[in-house]
Amino acid sequence: MTTLIAIGAGIAVFTGIGAGLGIGGATGKAVDAIARQPEAEGKISKALLLGAALAEATAIYGFVIALLIIMLLK
């Protein structure tokens, strides 16, 4: 049973990979957009920060779920 708990927690932590890929892709696209239209930097930066915060929140939720799985199912 403890092996299944560890596997479940490991799968929950994998949400960080998706968040990292999403934030990296969004940052790359934002840099491209700023390079093409420097005058729109403010709007692009605001949208990037909001998107990065939401993506990072999903990674934190996955981490919290992994901790809950480990703590509550022991």
Image (cartoon, rainbow, N blue to C red):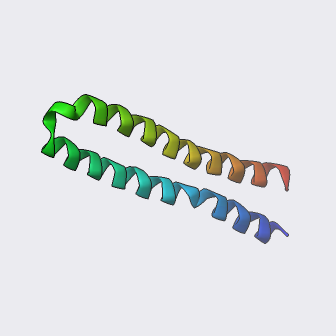
Residue 40 picture quarter: top left
Residue 32, placed above or below residue 11: above
Name the residue nearer the viewer: 1 or 21: 21
Residue at point 14% right, 36% down? 38
Residue at point 31% right, 47% down? 27
Q: Position of residue 2 (x, y in %)?
A: 81, 67
Name the residue nearer the viewer: 17 or 32: 32
Residue 12 lies left or right of residue 71; in this view the side is left
Name the residue nearer the viewer: 48 or 8: 48
Residue 64 picture quarter: top right
Residue 70 lies left or right of residue 36; in this view the side is right
Residue 37 lies left or right of residue 30; in this view the side is left
Q: Position of residue 9 (x, y in %)?
A: 70, 60
Residue 64, placed above or below residue 39: below
Q: Which quadrant holds the C terminus?
A: bottom right
Q: Position of residue 1 (x, y in %)?
A: 85, 70
